[in-house]
Amino acid sequence: MLGLTLELSGIFSFFRIPYNSLLMDTYLFPPKTTLIGMIGASIGWEEREFLKITKKSQYGLIIKNPGERVSETAVIFKNERTPVYPLTKNMNYKPIYKAFFTCEDDELVKLAYKYLQNPNHVLSMGESENLFYPKKPNFVKLFEVESVNVDNLTCLIPSSVYNEYVKGISPINKDLIPPYEVRIPIDFVGKEKNRRSVLKRVYCHYGVQLNLKNPLEVYKFGEDAVYLF
């Protein structure tokens, strides 16, 4: 099986949490749908192709540096009789991620590898104004992926796996973010106006190693062992 690793970086990133309405808040990291969207933009997929590939692909992610959380607040003014409501938006400043992608179709993985290096559309870190700035030319790499058993991990994992396997954590950086649970979009169902995201509970973290009770089968991309979902 073939797979890709992508080192993602930018000045700002914004990955909107879909179930927040009063605050424009962001995930700490790009969810699966964002990564597939970046790949789709590079190749030039239509929406139908994006939705199809999202179901056939697997994703993993390591937060290399969460950056800093920054906020901006704007006030929308309509007229003198309309109440004024401030609107606050949270963003990640100078984050770095390492994302992992595989698909049932090896030819599609090769195609993604080709077009990520010379994309059809400008790539962004969530919103279109948050441009993707690769730190080095070879930000995307192609690997022959193999399964391995491990007793520790540094990647995101689904909550069900976390609850069954994790026995504790060990710090690996001076600065760290302990594991916490979030719901992220991994797919979509419905059509047009009735389309909604399918959410999955995962644990994210930074600067810690997850120690496992028992060996867990994961996938190895070069030196990185990652749980895919």
Image (tube, rainbow, N blue to C red):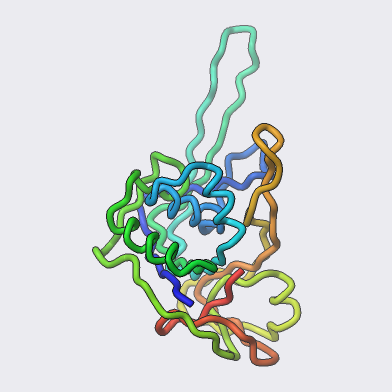
Q: Is residue 64 left or right of residue 118?
A: right
Residue at 58 percent of width and 76 percent of height? 227
Residue 112 spot, x, y in % from top left? 39, 60
Snapshot quadrant of residue 135 = bottom left
Residue 167 against residue 12 in the figure, above or below: below
Residue 123 spot, x, y in % from top left? 37, 48
Snapshot quadrant of residue 222 = bottom left
Q: How many marks?
A: 0
Q: Is residue 153 left or right of residue 3?
A: right
Residue at 32 percent of width and 61 percent of height? 114
Q: Is residue 163 left or right of residue 145?
A: right
Residue at 64 percent of width and 53 percent of height? 187
Residue 153 against residue 128 in the figure, above or below: below
Q: Nearer the viewer, residue 157 or 28?
A: 157
Residue at the extreme left of the image, as rendered? 137
Residue at 69 percent of width and 54 percent of height? 199
Q: Quadrant of the C terminus?
A: bottom right
Residue at the extreme top of the image, as rendered? 80
Residue 154 spot, x, y in % from top left? 53, 78
Residue 206 spot, x, y in % from top left? 52, 71
Q: Nearer the viewer, residue 90 or 221?
A: 221
